[in-house]
Image (tube, rainbow, N blue to C red):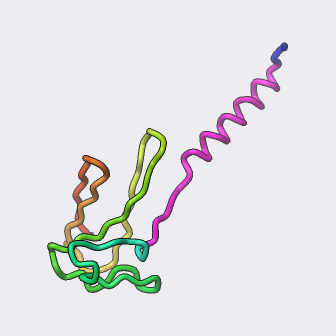
Amino acid sequence: MKTTPLTRIATFMAAFGLLAAAQAELSIPAFTAYTEPDSNGVTISKEKGITHWTDKKQRVLWFGEIKSSGKLTAVIKAKGAEGHNLRLTIGTHIKRGSKV
């Protein structure tokens, strides 16, 4: 089959569309979290998200499966007092930050 510039452009556009779809944004709401070691140690609600998290030993967790390799960008949206420390662990990778 002979390819023309138009065919190559259409193929490129289709491939670009698939690539763009593969990099879609995923938002995980706070109210889908789990807590440990005490499952009642933090208040979680759909309306207010995560509140009353005062115990430093308490952890807020989300679980998921990513079935393809590639770059992962994570953003945590947090409200509250400035200066709180945050740690995001994905597999064996740990990123630290603070609420600013």
For the N terminus, the image quarter is: top right
Total label count?
0
Tell whether 71 sits left or right of 15: left
Residue 79 vertical position relative to residue 14 in the rendered view, above or below: below
Tell whether 21 sits left or right of 47: right
Estimate the x, y position of residue 28 in percent, counting from the top left. Answer: 46, 66
Q: Residue 75's image quarter? A: bottom left
Main secondary structure found in the magenta portion: helix
Give the residue drawn at x 21%, y 73%.
37
Q: Residue 70's image quarter? A: top left
Q: Residue 51's image quarter? A: bottom left
Foreground residue among 58 and 72:
58
Foreground residue among 96 and 31:
31
Foreground residue among 27 and 3:
27
Estimate the x, y position of residue 23 in percent, counting from the top left. Answer: 54, 47
Give the residue drawn at x 27%, y 55%.
89
Residue 83 vertical position relative to residue 10 in the rendered view, above or below: below
Give the residue drawn at x 67%, y 34%.
15
Residue 1 vertical position relative to residue 22 in the rendered view, above or below: above
Give the residue drawn at x 31%, y 52%.
90
Estimate the x, y position of residue 50 in percent, counting from the top left. Answer: 34, 80
Q: Is residue 75 magenta?
A: no
Residue 32 vertical position relative to residue 12 in the rendered view, above or below: below
For the C terminus, the image quarter is: bottom left
Estimate the x, y position of residue 81 in percent, counting from the top left. Answer: 24, 80
Q: Is residue 11 magenta?
A: yes
Magenta residues span 4-29
